[in-house]
Amino acid sequence: MKRALIFQHMDHDHPGRFLDFFSEDGIVPEMVRLWEGQAIPSLAVFDFLFVLGGAQDTWQEEQHPWMVAEKAAIREWVWDRAKPYFGVCLGHQLLCDALGSEIGLTENPEVGVFDVSLTDDGKSHKLFSGLAPTNKVMQWHWAEAKRAPPGAQILATSERSAIQTIAVDSHAISTQFHCEFTPQTMAAWSSLPGYIASLERQNGAGAYRNLVNDATPLMPEMARMTRQVYDNLMVATGFRK
């Protein structure tokens, strides 16, 4: 039985459709609630590292001292162990930061449904094999990577944020967008007033209902894209023949 270590940064956040993927591949998830002080276990016994999003920013190590150990673990996992890694949103920014990039606030936040386009590297990289040149994705971020870390390739970009996806060789990938979001994820926000308030501060009154209306018909397409990337990662890393 394979084991996935999942770094969680806030309550009510989870890997969404990736939990189904893990189940199909016999990968058992283990969550670490970092913001509550749970310690990162030995990496040696795990096969996959998944790093979720969160309200924190990568430069807030004084406010969130656990982030120092998290970055060190990500660096060890991706550089030293070279095992399968997938990060979303903050998990994307943490990977970039841990490997030597710069993270800062974006001038144009992306909150809602946006297009991302494959770069030339993305069109030829095995982790993006089978993807359309442009894809609809779910976004929710106010910070971004300002440059790719050394040794990484930029696979996707958007009009507002240039570094939407990076890959390190063929064993690590991260997305600024939330490819883990599902219809169930959006439904859960209706019981979380803080999430609704955050959407309305950015996009105005009625933002939650507008986002559900926009995103729901696109979810099957988003799921297919995410599944393709995950399958590519599984094959490239030897998880699946």
Image (cartoon, helix red, strand yellow):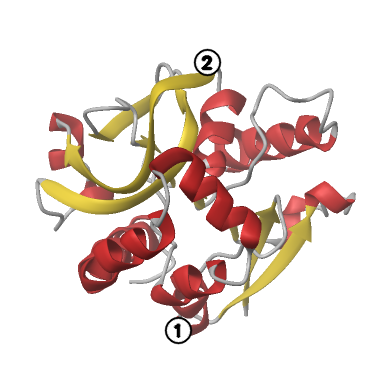
The nearer-to-camera label among 1 and 2 is: 2
Where is residue 184 drawn, in percent x and y?
47, 77
Which residue is drawn at the image coordinates 38% and 57% (left, top)? 179
Front-lying residue, 111 or 137: 111
- Is residue 175 at all visible to an observer of this figure? no
Left or right, 158 with reference to 142: left
Q: Nearer the viewer, residue 60 or 80?
A: 60
Of mark 1 and mark 2, the one earlier in the sequence is 1
Query: What residue is at 59 percent from the left and 34 percent from the top?
Result: 94
Tell me the SS state at disc 1: helix
Nearer-the-camera pick, 43 or 182: 182
Picture layout, residue 210 above or below residue 87:
below
Whether residue 188 is visible here, answered yes or no, is yes
Specify the quadrant of the image occupied by residue 73.
top right
Secondary element at image label 2:
loop
The picture places residue 89, in percent across and down from the top left corner, at 49, 43
Amino acid bearing label 2: Glu
Residue at point 73%, 32% (across, down): 72
| Quadrant that contains the N terminus | bottom right
Of all residues shown, which one is farthest toward the front? 205
User: Mark 1 is on which residue type?
Assistant: Glu
Crowd rating for badge 1 (residues with CA inside 10 Å; few <14, some 14–19, many 20+):
few
Q: Check the image and report above or below for 3 versus 144.
A: below
Distance between mark 1 and mark 2 Cα atoms? 36 Å
Q: Which residue is mark 1?
A: 24
Q: Where does residue 4 sit, x and y in percent of width and height?
A: 62, 65
Q: Quadrant of the C terminus?
A: bottom left
Q: Which residue, given by chain and number where applicable, does mark 2 sit on?
A: 102
Decide: is 10 above or below 100: below
